Image: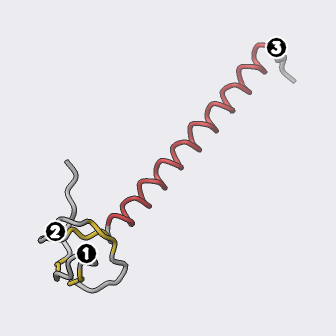
């Protein structure tokens, strides 16, 4: 066997805890980014009234719920 000091045990436990917190934070950030990307895929901006609405259908052309204009799906660019 090899000798282990109290300082070494505390350091190992601290590293394990910090690594687990870091990797759980990293996983949460990756999953949140994926969900935001998936949700943004369904947003449509009306070309007439600039209303942003969510259309869950897979059709290429959707109807604006505010002004009933037909809109094509386009990528939403964030500034």
Q: Earlier in the sequence, mark 3 or mark 1?
A: 3
Q: Residue at x 83, y 20 (%)?
A: 2
Question: From what the image shows, is residue 33 above or below residue 54?
Answer: above
Question: From what the image shows, is residue 74 above or below residue 26?
Answer: below
Residue 49 got which mark? 2
SS at mark 1 in the image: loop
Q: Residue at x 62, y 37 (%)?
A: 21
Mark pair 2, 1: CA separation: 8 Å
Residue of label 1:
66
Nearer-the-camera pick, 75 or 67: 67
Residue 5 got which mark? 3
Q: Earlier in the sequence, mark 2 or mark 1?
A: 2
Q: Quadrant of the N terminus?
A: top right
Q: Residue at x 40, y 58 (%)?
A: 36
SS at mark 2 in the image: loop
Mark pair 2, 3: CA separation: 70 Å
């Amino acid at each position: 066997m090899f000798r282990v000091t109290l300082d070494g045990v505390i350091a190992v436990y601290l590293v394990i805890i910090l690594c687990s917190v870091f990797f759980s934070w990293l996983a949460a950030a990756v999953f949140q980014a994926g969900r935001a990307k998936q949700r943004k895929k369904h947003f449509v901006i009306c070309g007439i009234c600039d209303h942003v609405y969510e259309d869950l259908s897979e059709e290429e052309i959707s109807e604006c719920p505010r002004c009933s204009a037909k809109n094509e799906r386009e990528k939403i660019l964030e500034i």
